[in-house]
Image (tube, rainbow, N blue to C red):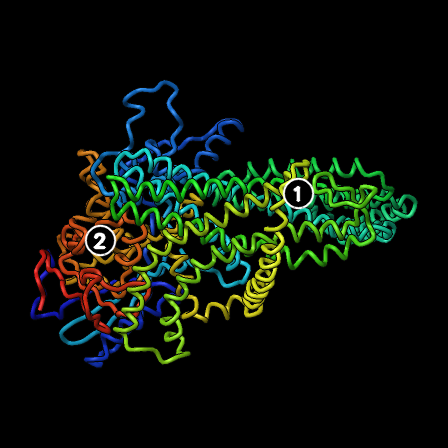
Amino acid sequence: MNPAPTSERPERVAVIVVHGIADQVRGVTGAQVATQLAAGSHAPVTRINTPIDVTALAPAVPFHRWDPKGWIERSSKSLRQSLRSDFLDAQLGEQPAPTPSAVADAPLPNSAASDSGVDHGVRFTDYLLAKAASVRRGEITPHHYDMPSHRVSSPLRQTDVFEMHWADLSRLGGGATRILTELFTLLFHLSKLGSDTLSLADVALGPSGVMRWLARTHRWANWVFSRVLALLFLQLLMCALLLIPAALIVGRERSFSLGAAVLAGTALAVVCVYLLRRPWVWGFWAGLSGGGVLAWAALQHPATGAWWVMLTGGALLLWAYKRFLGYCEERFRAVYGVGAVLMALTLSAIVWGAAEHDVAGAGERIVAGVLRAVEVLLLAQLSGWVLMALLVTAAVSLGEWACSGAHNSAERRQSIVTARLGLFVSVGIFVAFVMTVWALVSQPMEALVEGLHYAPWWFADVTVDGRLQSGRFLALRFSASTDTFAVIAVMLLALLGFVALVFLPSVLIEVRLVKGPVAPRLGHWLTAGYRALDRLVRWWSWLITLVLIGVAVLLVGSQLARLGISLPWLGVVALPVGSWSGDLLAKLVLLVAGGAVGLVAIGGVAFKQLKALRAPLDAALDVDNHFREFPRKAIPRVMIIERYVAVLEHVLKQGYDRIVIVAHSQGTVITADLLRYLQRRGQLLPATHGDDRLLLLGRELAARNVRLLTCGSPLRQLYALRFPCQYGWVLGKNGSHGPDPRADLGVAHWVNVWAAGDYVGRWLWTTARDPALPALSVDATAYDGKPTQQA
């Protein structure tokens, strides 16, 4: 119960403010709310930073982390986690029991495979807590957090505004490099998020052979895309980085060797002074003597010096590659293993090509070896795209079959659309990026190897003597690798373009570039766009599938021709398609390259100021971070929950008469997830854990009759629509009403304010079929502990 205010003191009210998307500055949101509260009574506002300790949280259902022994077990675990989330596994990724038994194989209560009756959103939250706890190994050292707080004092009421700031735990950094890194992580994780959503639907919506095969097909399509095709492209970039010094060193062996000697002497001096802590005189003489010896050797044997330069540079490149794979492995499992295998393939091809070409200089041999590796990698990439076309065809066919069966449901259809959106958007952006990079580096690479010769192994577009100018070889390979894929990129990016078109009026109005229509008309535009998206994705999938099949046939046919199997019609079809696709490629290069250059030019600080233009991107990043499971030591959702719990515990200890939570946009999702988890954690706990910390916190919050005000909540039009198996509760029991504040979140009063033109979040209880959408409205149905209409 709330403590009753007395006539001797003013009412004490706590307001917890949770901000929404975009890079919010710590303390600004709380200050704005406090200023608005003080405006009516002209009360003073005082800022006081409140220090609190944030401690690690224990899951309701812990599990024993599998620490694999040996490279076979490590590879097995990494491969399994790369295919699907451990949440879908009955044991959450534990080591398989040596002897199967009913007890050992029983699903853990917080796994998706369990029949515990707890909704999957609550289970997923506990699963993330369990994963984070398994890495910490019982470490519960609290960390300090200065919570921004403001006090509004008046004779009748003292209001303390506490800001639950979470942007620093789930946001872009200030530099352009960090922004690009996060964008690439988002690019590859969207496909994984879609396949995991579909896999969860397969588990949660009952047994279905079609859904099981559909989920497997999407998982393999995502794996081929993100672990094979993406890493093959990375190998090609490594070849380009190795080709540049190899081509430049041709005819300049003596100069490169002397330059390397100078650099080696400088490095030796730096090591002596800064690492070994010797006097600078020692470093000077060490660098001078070492560099002098190497320079003398370079003058005596320039060819040998050139080989040492190339081998040293290659070793440094491999070291950087290894570090990059380690960084990626923390976010995308199995990248390290697959990347190591592909690098072994690349190095083997380089050695093969260098040994096969009988040329004198080190640079010419390395160039020949690198071009052989490029040839092998392009053939592997071609095979990967043919496999990708087959997987996408199977996924689309199975998806339509699943939507037409007896078990068809809205949740199944929405999950399938989510999986397709994630896959197609990720692949489309990746293809456009790859072709843009190809176009930007092809001509400089051709100019570098001009005058050198290469004898192709597979792509034998050769002269009479079996040799070809290296520049000509690269030009032919660029043309053959991009002419047909531009069509695929345009088809895939068209889906992203439709989403952008739906958002465009709202974004233009937000940045004040145009004077838009009244909010109801803008709301109807958004509603029509959201309704059309599902239908468009389903029908457009067939067009994308047909294009992929056509490209696969052209690719296979061109390779059969190299084996002497002639297809007369292939040239008739390939020439016009290649010409048209080449024109599209030129436009894509200008668009993608211009955007990348603009991003780097404006820099991270300026980019962060474009809040209206960044809102759709921030929304996508928020969704991605909300479901992200890696890296285990810093799962964004776990860190946000731990801070939020510390804020709630601090406020409850102060004995306020009333507690109000004000959440905006993504902050409403964070709040709803935590409150719902606190109310249902007891269903996952054994009966003997009545003194559980989070269980007691949930009970105390329910007893205090907390009020909740949400603004522009995306719970319904984004999360319940795209992730129905975790957020189906938002729609109510029959799927057409809305959440119950007391039963779902344990709050006494929940009011949602929304604007019709908000593309992030709108209504919760108002149905989507309302003929008139108000510009700014409180939901027609609000609750005060039970479903009753509010005046």
- Please indicate, yes or no, whether residue 23 appears anywhere in the rendered image: no
| Residue 184 place in picture, x, y as percent | 51, 53
The amino acid at mark 2 is: Val
In the rendered image, the vertical position of residue 441 relative to residue 32, given as above or below? above
**Element type at mark 2:** helix
- Where residue 204 sits: x, y (%)? 27, 39
Name which residue lies at 47% across and 29% down: 68
Identify the secondary structure beneath mark 1: helix
Identify the residue at image location x=16%, y=58%. 706
In percent of the image, x 34 and y 51: which residue is there? 54
Position in image of residue 783 (x %, y %): 12, 60
Rendering coords of residue 636 (x, y %):
39, 51
Q: Is residue 350 left or right of residue 157?
A: right
Q: Of the residues under marks 2 and 1, which one precedes in the sequence?
A: 1
Instruction: Give the CA distance from mark 2 to mark 1.
Output: 50 Å
Q: Which mark is residue 624?
A: none
Image depth: mark 2 or mark 1 in front: 2
Please give left or right for residue 241 compared with residue 724 in the image: right
- How many labels sit on residues? 2
* Residue of label 1: 318
Give, as a three-letter code, the residue at label 1: Leu
Mark 2 crowd level (few <14, some 14–19, many ≥20, 10 Å Cα):
many
The residue at which mark 2 appears reads as 730
Q: Quadrant of the C terminus?
A: bottom left
Reply above or below: 20 against 743. Answer: below
> In which quadrant will I find the N terminus?
bottom left
Picture quadrant where residue 663 is located: bottom left
- Can I make out residue 196 in this image? yes
Q: In the displayed image of the protein, which residue is found farthest to the top?
A: 99
In the rendered structure, the answer to whether residue 378 lies left or right of residue 212 reads right
Q: Relative to residue 791, is residue 242 depicted above or below?
A: above
